[in-house]
Amino acid sequence: KWSRITSDGNWDREPSWSADGKSLLFASNRGGNFDIWQIAVGDTGAAASPTRVFGSGEDESTPLALSDGRVLFGRGRGSAARLWIREPGGAERRLTSGRVAERWPALSPDGKRVAFVILAETGRRLVIRPLDAAPERRGADSTVVSAAGIERPAWSPNGDRLTYTVGGARRGVFVVPTDGRYTNLASARHAASAWMPDGRRITLV
């Protein structure tokens, strides 16, 4: 049974569960810019009104709650998009010190790695980075695959593979091991993907 969580005229997007599974984090423009909001969720839907968690003069996006209370999120638009980590006390730091756009973060099942897409003038790269690597640490990013149009990576349940989607002429959903040694086409659709718990099936949206 579906339960509607928000029902006003604002644009609420990119929801993700809190670490304890009792609330949703999401990006919303209900305060003007896109900020990060949170709403408690019960068995029958929303258990309270949304509350603003944090924001800035820029747009925030793709919040991911970490088990220790931190939040991984995106900040900025277009070529200025970067990934950030916010501490429970409010301190923030960049995930990397790179100068290219970073989008679509995905946290590994063990919570120790982040897969995301780097968008550069020369193309896109799906990379993996240790979550707690220092932002200025060179060589921390491991490139899994490079291709035009890469979007929205998702981890397999045991963390040994990723799916990602590609738009354009070579559109589809692809499966790749974290070492990038091969790439398999899972579907010819351009769609976001999610792994089933058995690790053998993928759902597409």
Image (cartoon, rainbow, N blue to C red):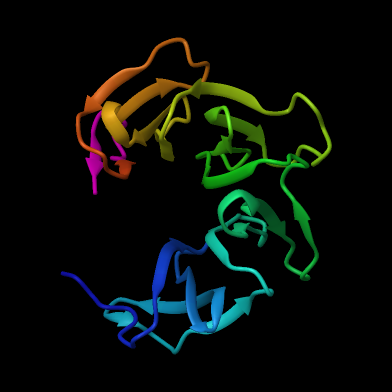
Please check the rendered image and state whether residue 173 is part of the magenta-colored stretch, yes or no: no
> Vertical placement of 127 versus 45: above or below?
above
User: In the image, is 43 to the left or to the right of 69?
Assistant: left
Q: Residue at x 63, y 38 (%)?
A: 112
Q: Is residue 1 in view?
A: yes
Residue 42, picture quadrant: bottom left
User: In the image, is 151 to the left or to the right of 44?
Assistant: right
Nearer-the-camera pick, 70 or 61: 61
Give the percent coordinates (x, y) of residue 21: 45, 64
Quadrant that contains the N terminus: bottom left
- Residue range highlighted in magenta: 195-205
Q: Is residue 19 in view?
A: no
Tell me which secondary structure the magenta stretch mostly adopts: loop
Q: Residue at x 74, y 62 (%)?
A: 87
> Vertical placement of 66 versus 158: above or below?
below
Give the percent coordinates (x, y) of residue 103: 54, 47
> Vertical placement of 47 versus 108: above or below?
below
Please check the rendered image and state whether residue 199 is part of the magenta-colored stretch, yes or no: yes
Q: Residue furthest top?
A: 181
Nearer-the-camera pick, 103 or 135: 103
Q: Residue at x 46, y 24 (%)?
A: 160
Residue 164, picture quadrant: top left
Q: Residue furthest left?
A: 1
Figure disc tally: 0
Q: Residue at x 32, y 78 (%)?
A: 5
> Vertical placement of 85 versus 159: above or below?
below
Give the percent coordinates (x, y) of residue 123: 52, 29
Q: Residue furthest front?
A: 121
